[in-house]
Amino acid sequence: PGAGSRSMEAERIVKLQPAYKDYLWGGSRLRERFRKASDLERIAESWELSAHEAGQSVIAEGRYKGMLFGEYLNRIGKGAWGWKCQSFSRFPILIKLLDAREDLSIQVHPDDEYALTNEGECGKYEMWHILDCAPGASVYHGFLRDTTPEELRRRIADGTLTELLRELPVSPGDTVFIPTGCVHAVRGGILLCEIQQNSDSTYRLYDYNREDRYHNRRPLHVDKALDVLDLQGEGKQPSLVKTADMLHWVQGDGFEKSTLGTCKYFESVCYNIKESASIEGDDASFLSVLFVDGEGVIEAGGKSLAFCSGDSFFISAGKGSVRISGESRCIVTYV
């Protein structure tokens, strides 16, 4: 390897600058609520922790400022990702904020086996944590009844696909898992945090015949979608919807925490911090800390950084505590 790929010492904590996406269903809340700064007309998604070539985060400050997150991860080495990541060929997680002003397309994600064969990357298992939504908001999640490829193609053609879909009402604080093979869509009026495998493999079944400003429709991927879709109806597709009042809050000294969701790819914990919280790091995994409310200071490895709502931090694996001071709420994710 050339000098450009030489290894370097990991910072215990780095702040990340997101990559932005201006998909046509996006709105303005990422700019308004999280002070996201972008030249894009609308911000649909901010990829807060991303080493994916379709949109990489950037180190926001310090000696590695301006470096792509993927390059940073490669240069610090897998030891700094944690021993649970040693078997992965690439960094395992991608975390986004997403603002749906309108309905997203109806879509499905492939599993690892199909995606590795057909897309050259892992599959896309994901979890949504609802941060805010309009009253009566809902998501599409699975089919109401068993269906067939023939019926699906017919309903895509005549615009009645949504009649087959199960609608799940959502409220702020809910968590929804989207297994691979599950037909789904975020609907309009929802602001959420999406935690997923590090993959951009999405197969679009239907997009309401929408056109962009150049009168182009976005491509559909019906054949691939049918290869991976679970066509069984409600009750057979695993999902987890936890509302805010079902969360099991564990009280700490100056904070409370609750597990938002656990799967074989990641675990995410929400911290409500009244005064301060201490999070113990270990050698098993890195930590991602994404603040969704409040402001204060985060400290790790002898380094203190100010944060406000919408800020994202990557903490390399290793023993030693991460201390957060200031009234705030954050989502901590690890493998």
Image: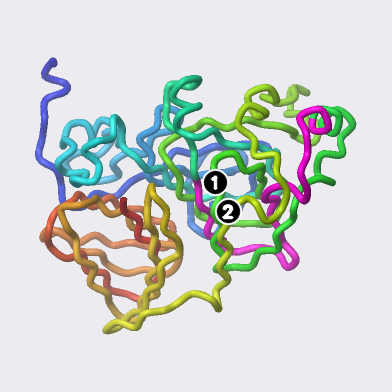
Q: Secondary structure at mark 1?
A: loop
Q: Is residue 139 left or right of residue 329?
A: right
124, above or below 221, in the image: below
Q: Is residue 90 magenta?
A: no
Q: Residue at x 27, y 84 (%)?
A: 253
Tell me residue 10's x, y (percent): 14, 43
Q: Nearer the viewer, residue 20 or 94?
A: 94
Give the number of the disc on residue 179. 1
Q: Is residue 68 visible?
A: no
Residue type at tag 2? Pro
Closer to the eye: label 1 or 2: 2
Q: Residue furthest top?
A: 2
What mark, if any, has residue 286 been given in the picture? none
Image point (46%, 29%), residue name: 113
Query: To which quarter of the image does residue 232 belong?
Result: top right
The image's colouring method is rainbow
Mark 2 or mark 1, which is nearer the start of the sequence? 1
Question: At 40% from the left edge and 72% from the top edge, which residue is drawn?
Answer: 258
* Residues rendered magenta in the picture: 126-152
> Residue 43, position in %: x, y?
57, 43
